[in-house]
Image (spheres, rainbow, N blue to C red):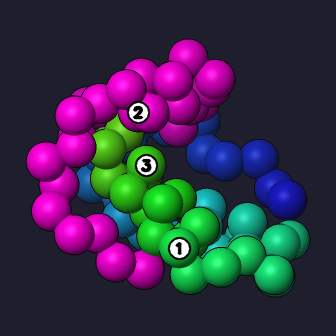
Amino acid sequence: MNSPSNSPLGGRAGADDVALVSAYLADNPRLSKGAVGAARHFLKWARARKIPTRDLDASAVDRFLRHRCRCGRYSP
C-alpha cells in the first residue's frame, strides 16, 4: 500500500479518506463491509478532531476506541 498523505486533514479530507480506504481495500480484498464501515468511522472521527493523517498511530486508535460514540449509525 502507498503511504498515506502527510498533509493535515483539510479541504481534500474526504477525497484523501476515500483514497486511503480504497488503497487498503485493494491490498485486503477479503475485508467485511463492517470493517470498511469501521475504517470510515475512524477517519470521520479523526477528521472531526483535526488529527493529521501522519499522526494516526496506536495512540490515536486507542483514543478512538475510548470515545463515547454519538455518531449515529455509521454505514459502509
**Residue placed under numbered mark 3 in the picture:** 42
In this rendering, which labeled residue sits more in front, label 3 or label 1? 1
Residue 71 part of the magenta segment? yes
Q: Quadrant of residue 59?
A: top right
Quadrant in which the N terminus appears: bottom right
Q: In front: 9, or 25?
A: 25
Q: Which residues are magenta?
A: 48-76
Query: Residue, x 73% and y 66% (percent of image)?
Result: 24
Magenta stretch contains residue 60: yes
Under circle 3, the secondary element is: helix
Label pair 2/3, CB-CB below 8 angstroms:
yes
Name which residue lies at 38% across and 57% down. 41
**How far across and how far down the image is residue 76, in percent?**
42, 80
Q: Residue at x 34, y 77 (%)?
A: 75
Question: Which residue is label 1 attached to?
Answer: 34
Q: Residues within 10 Å of mark 1 (few under 14, many from 20)?
A: few
Mark 2 is on which residue type?
Answer: Phe
Is residue 51 in view? Answer: no
Distance from disc 3 to disc 1, alpha carbons, whole Å, reads 12 Å
Q: Residues within 10 Å of mark 2 (few under 14, many from 20)?
A: some
**Disc 2/disc 1 C-alpha distance (Å):** 16 Å
Residue type pointed to by label 3 = Phe
Q: Is residue 72 left or right of residue 24?
A: left
Q: Is residue 56 visible?
A: yes
Disc 2, SS? helix
Residue 64 image label: 2
